[in-house]
Amino acid sequence: MQNSKDCAVCRLIRFYLMLAVPLIAMVGLGSLGVGDETQSVVWFARVELIDFLAWGSAFALVTILAYRVYVEFWIPKKRSKALAEILRNQSGDDVT
């Protein structure tokens, strides 16, 4: 996404559309057939919006935390092991 040829405003508008359109659709579907039992209502239209946002935030927190742990700890550890292996191979080649 960093090397994208789209401008920053286009990316921001696209992000808001991906976030806002489903949110507005859920709110709109939630207001359909509140008192009428004959209409079929989609399952997520019965979910309270605050519950959806709370679970979404919790999922985002866990996902972001897992990604940051991977980037901050796992990748540097893997790179340092690879560097140590390269240096060990280099020092072994110099001796012979």
Image (cartoon, helix red, strand yellow):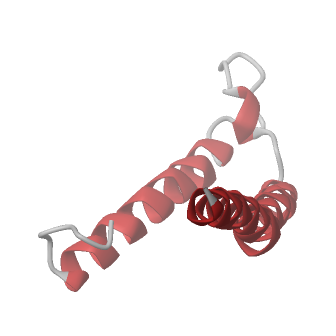
| Residue at figure coordinates x 76%, y 61% from the top left | 81
Q: Quadrant of the C terminus?
A: bottom right
Q: Where does the image place residue 91, in percent across and percent down from the top left?
A: 65, 66
Between 33 and 64, the residue placed more toward the observer is 64
The answer to whether 28 appears left or right of 74 in the picture is left
Q: Residue at x 78, y 22 (%)?
A: 37
Q: On the rendered image, what quadrant is the N terminus found in? A: bottom left
Q: Quadrant of residue 12?
A: bottom left
Identify which residue is drawn at 31% across, 73% down.
2
Towards the viewer: 84 or 95? 95
Point 82% across, 55% down: residue: 59
Compared with 40, 73 (above or below) is below
Residue 10: percent from the left, percent from the top?
Answer: 20, 74
Q: Residue 29 in the image: x percent, y percent? A: 59, 42
Number of numbered discs: 0
Q: Is residue 8 above or below residue 17?
A: below
Left or right: 46, with 20 as reference point: right
**Residue that protrudes farthest toward the bottom in the picture:** 9
Asked whether 38 or 11 is in front, the reply is 11
Please state the horizontal and vertical placement of residue 65, each as a whole percent of the image.
82, 68
Which of the 4 image quarters holds residue 62?
Answer: bottom right
Q: Is residue 75 left or right of residue 27?
A: right
